[in-house]
Image (cartoon, helix red, strand yellow):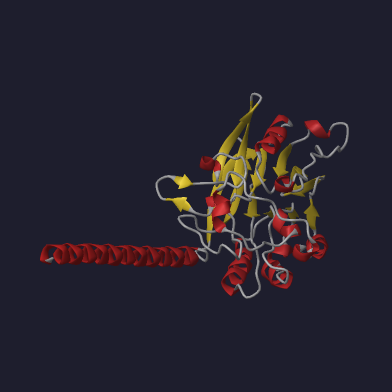
Amino acid sequence: MTSSLATSSSLAEAVSRTVRGAALAAGAATAGAGILFGYGLGQTTRFGVREETLALLPPGSSPIRMLHLSDIHMVPGQELKRRWLQSLADLKPDLVINTGDNLGHLEGLDALLEALDPLMAFPGAFVPGSNCYFGPRPKNPFRYLAKRSDTPRNSPKYQLPWQEMHRAFGAAGWVNLTNRNHSLAVNGTRLDFTGVDDPHLDLDRFAGWPAGSATSGSAPHLRIALAHAPYQRVLDRFTAAGTDLILAGHTHGGQVCIPGYGALVTNCDLPTWRASGLTQWDFAGKSTPLNVSAGIGTSRFAPVRIACPPEAILLTLTAQG
């Protein structure tokens, strides 16, 4: 009888130790997740400017300083983001390029336009992203780790004031390149632009290049293509068409990256090692510089960045040889 009681007591103690250990492990995991979330939340306001230089302009051309903005995802009350965006006007760019996903809230337009107001004093061009048309929805953040997350529902409930935003950009002189092309003269060089509507929503239609005069193709110029989401079919089409430079966003640089490894996903079919930065895109024997922005904001339902701080890019184009 005594032996049976002792065995029962030992078993109870073992069970108790196991339960305590599991509780401690769960507590540690919860604390670790909280620390990681706090770190990721703090990273969302570590704004910076990445500077790149490319020798692409015709010989003898004056340099062109191009400020590339993407994925602002503006939400009312984001004062640090607003002030930082306004401060970018101090860079005095020759041209501002906006590659979409400007809004993060149904009531974010006033805050966005206030933040961009100093920059809209400069010439610019833009294409939209899905979060220019439709606002973010609450969803399981782990779905973002899928190869391609679901696209926004085309529902009036989530529709953003994109038409008013585009009118404000246009009133400031920014060129709408939504499935369109246009030429701009900047610092004495002709820049030929083409842009597409958001490939993530399958709205992209390549418009070719500005026609110009019969001899315009032989005059000094540079061809620049814009897209929000850098899907491979779009990059291939741009490259095959003789593009000199491609600018895109959408990826958030992976948003959650592993130090020493990089991005886990790009939210499109772009390889993860191209999630942000300046690389070369090769297709059909041609090679084009591709600049993918890590973006400035995040969805308000996933407000973290890990090893991937927000950025604007100051791209200086200089004369060749």
Quadrant showing the N terminus: bottom left
Q: Quadrant of residue 21?
A: bottom left
| Residue 201 vertical placement versus 155 (above, below) | above
Q: Position of residue 172 (x, y in %)?
A: 79, 63
Q: Position of residue 114 (x, y in %)?
A: 70, 72
Nearest the camera: 287 or 76?
A: 76
Q: Residue furthest front?
A: 1
Q: Residue furthest left?
A: 2
In screen coordinates, is 38 left or right of 129?
left
Nearest the camera: 122 or 275?
A: 275
Residue plotted at (60% across, 68% down): 87
In screen coordinates, is 184 left or right of 311?
right
Nearest the camera: 223 or 76?
A: 76
Residue plotted at (73% across, 49% down): 186
Task: Count the labels in the image.
Answer: 0
In screen coordinates, is 37 left or right of 75?
left
Q: Is residue 92 in sight in this rendering? A: yes
Q: Position of residue 102 (x, y in %)?
A: 69, 60
Residue plotted at (52% across, 62% down): 304
Q: Residue furthest right?
A: 214
Residue plotted at (20% across, 64% down): 8
Q: Residue furthest top?
A: 285
Q: Quadrant of residue 226?
A: top right
In screen coordinates, is 270 left or right of 152?
left
| Residue 98 vertical placement versus 188 (above, below) | below
Quadrant showing the C terminus: top right
Q: Is residue 58 in sight in this rendering? A: no
Q: Position of residue 47 (x, y in %)?
A: 53, 63
| Residue 60 vertical placement versus 282 (above, below) | below
